[in-house]
Image (spheres, coloured by chain):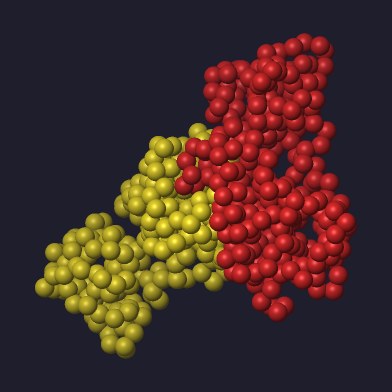
Chain colours: A red, B yellow
Amino acid sequence: MYDVAIIGTGPAGLSAALTLQLHEKSIIWFGSPDMSPKVEKSEKIANYPGVGLISGEELNRRFREHAAQLALTPVDRMVTTIMPAQGHFSLLADNELYESKTLLLTTGVVSANGIPGEAEYLGRGVSYCATCDGFLYKGKTIAVFCGSKRYEHEVAYLAGLAEKVFLFTSYKDSDVTAENIQRVGPIREVKGGMKVKSILLADGTEMPVSALFCLRNAVAPSTLLADIRLDGPHIVVNRQQETNLPGCYAAGDCTGRPYQLTKAVGEGNVAAHAILDYLSEHA
Amino acid sequence: MYDVAIIGTGPAGLSAALTLQLHEKSIIWFGSPDMSPKVEKSEKIANYPGVGLISGEELNRRFREHAAQLALTPVDRMVTTIMPAQGHFSLLADNELYESKTLLLTTGVVSANGIPGEAEYLGRGVSYCATCDGFLYKGKTIAVFCGSKRYEHEVAYLAGLAEKVFLFTSYKDSDVTAENIQRVGPIREVKGGMKVKSILLADGTEMPVSALFCLRNAVAPSTLLADIRLDGPHIVVNRQQETNLPGCYAAGDCTGRPYQLTKAVGEGNVAAHAILDYLSEHA
C-alpha cells in the first residue's frame, strides 16, 4: 500500500512528487519517463520565474534531471481504471493492480476534435497558448482558431503582435476587432513542411501563415474515476486541490485554465501539502 | 492610469509581473529591487521543479535577473494606503499618488493587524514612512519598530531628528547606533487618546512617545485596504485569486498556507490571467 499514487508526469505531477519525496512518503508515480510532451513541444517559455527565456525541450530535460536527483522514477504504465475502496484506491495499470492511500490526478487536458494537421505541427507553428508563444510571431502573418468568447482577449493580444491575423471563431456574436484581423471561414487543415506554412479553408482557399493558434476548451475524457465531479472537461477542486472524493486530489491543466506550467507546479505543491495533511490525519 | 498595480516583489509578484509584461499591460510594481528576503534567506530549496537543489540566495538572484530580462523594474516605495474608487484604485506610496485599473496584493504574510493600536493610530502618530513624516517629530521622543536591516538608514534619519528613539528590531545583528537610541524589547501595544501617547512593552513597561514608526517589508492587508475580507492573517481568495473587492486580486503567502515559493509563483500566474480577463471585460 503506497501513501500516494500520482498519475501524470507533467509539471503538476513532478511538483507534487518532489515535495512528497522530500517528506519521505512512499510514492507510485505513473506516466512517461519523458515527462511532459506539452512542455517539450513549447518553442519558448518566458514566464517561469527564475528560469528566464528557455526552450520547452530544455526545461523538460531539467524536469527529468530534477526527478532523477531525488531518485523519482515514473512507472511507464497506463492506468486504465481506478476504484475507490474503504480508505484507499485500487488502480489497474497494464493489468497490474496497485493500492494507495491517496490519489493525485495530474492528467492534463487532451484536445478532441482537432484540426487535421494540428497534432502533427504542434510545437512547429501550432500553439495552444497565446501567452506562451505569441511573441514568437511578432510582425508575422498567423491564423487563429478561437473556440470561445472568453479567449477573445488572447486574440486581441495576438493581433497586437502579428502583422496580420486570419481569424475563425466557432461561435456566433464574436466582437473582437482590429484593423489587421481578417475573418475567415472554417479551417479545414493546417499544412506545412518542417513548420507550418499555410491553412486550408473550407472553401478551398489556402492562406500562407507562420502559425496557427488553437484557443479552445479541450475535452478531458476522464473515464478513470466514475464518480469524480467535473465541470465541462475539468475536474472540480477547491483551493486545497481536493476533489469531491475523499483522499483524491487533482492539479494542473486538468483542473482548468490557465493552461500554464507555472500554475501547474503551484497546484502540484498545494496538492502535496494537502495530501501530507490528509495522511497525518488518517495515520 | 496603469492597467495593474502589483504590491510585492516576492515570487508571486514576480510571476504575475512576468506574464502581464508579456501581455504588454502597463504595470506599476511596488517593492524592493532586492526581491524576496524570504527566498534570499532560504538555505536550500529542493522542490522548485526544474531548478534542482539551489540556495535561496542564488534563486533570488535569478529572480532579479529574470525581471531585468523583461525590463521589469520595481518601484522601491512603500504603499501605505489604497482607496478603491469607481472602477479603479488610488494608491499612496511615500506621499505620491498612483492610479491603477486593477490591483494585485502579493504582500507576504504579516501578523494579522500589526501591533495592537497600529491601525487605529495610523496618521495620528503611527507612520510607515520616515521620510514622509519624520520632520513632524523634531525634538520629540518617538518609538521605532524596525523589521529589516534595509530600513536602518531610516532609523538613523529619525534619530537625527528626534530627541530620543526607543528602538525595537525584530531581527538579529542590527548595527544601527546613536547616542539617543535606546533599545527596547518587543512592543506589545501603541496607546493614546486623540494621538499616540505611549508604547507598552512586552515586559509591561510603558514609555511615553509622540509617535511610532513601523518600518517593515509589508503592511497588514487590512491596514492597506479597509474592506478587504480576511480569514485570520490571510486574504480570502477564490480559485481565480479574486478577493471580495472587484478588480483586486491576491497571491502568494498572503492568501494562506502552504508558505511555499512554488505555490506562490503558481498563484501569481493565475492572478495575472484573471486580471487579463478582467481588463478585457472592462475595456
Which residue sits at x=77%, y=41%? A110
- In the visual, does B104 lie left or right of A74? left
Q: Is residue A243 above or below residue A162?
A: below
Tell which of B224 and B47 is nearer to you: B47
Q: Position of residue A192 (x, y in %)?
A: 70, 18
Q: Residue furthest left?
A: B179
Which residue sits at x=82%, y=13%? A203
- In the visual, does B140 lie left or right of B129? left
Q: Position of residue A187 (x, y in %)?
A: 78, 21
- Residue A115, image quadrant: top right
Q: Residue furthest top?
A: A205
Tell which of A279 and B27 is nearer to you: A279
Tell which of B212 and B145 is nearer to you: B145
Q: Position of residue B257 (x, y in %)?
A: 56, 66
What is the quadrant of the C terminus of chain A in the image?
A: bottom right
Which residue sits at x=71%, y=13%? A207
Tell which of B59 and B237 is nearer to you: B59
Which residue sits at x=77%, y=16%? A200
- Residue B187, image quadrant: bottom left
Can you see residue B268? no
Q: Is residue A245 above or below residue B190?
A: above
Q: Position of residue B258 (x, y in %)?
A: 56, 65
Can you see residue B80? yes
- Residue B250, image quadrant: bottom right
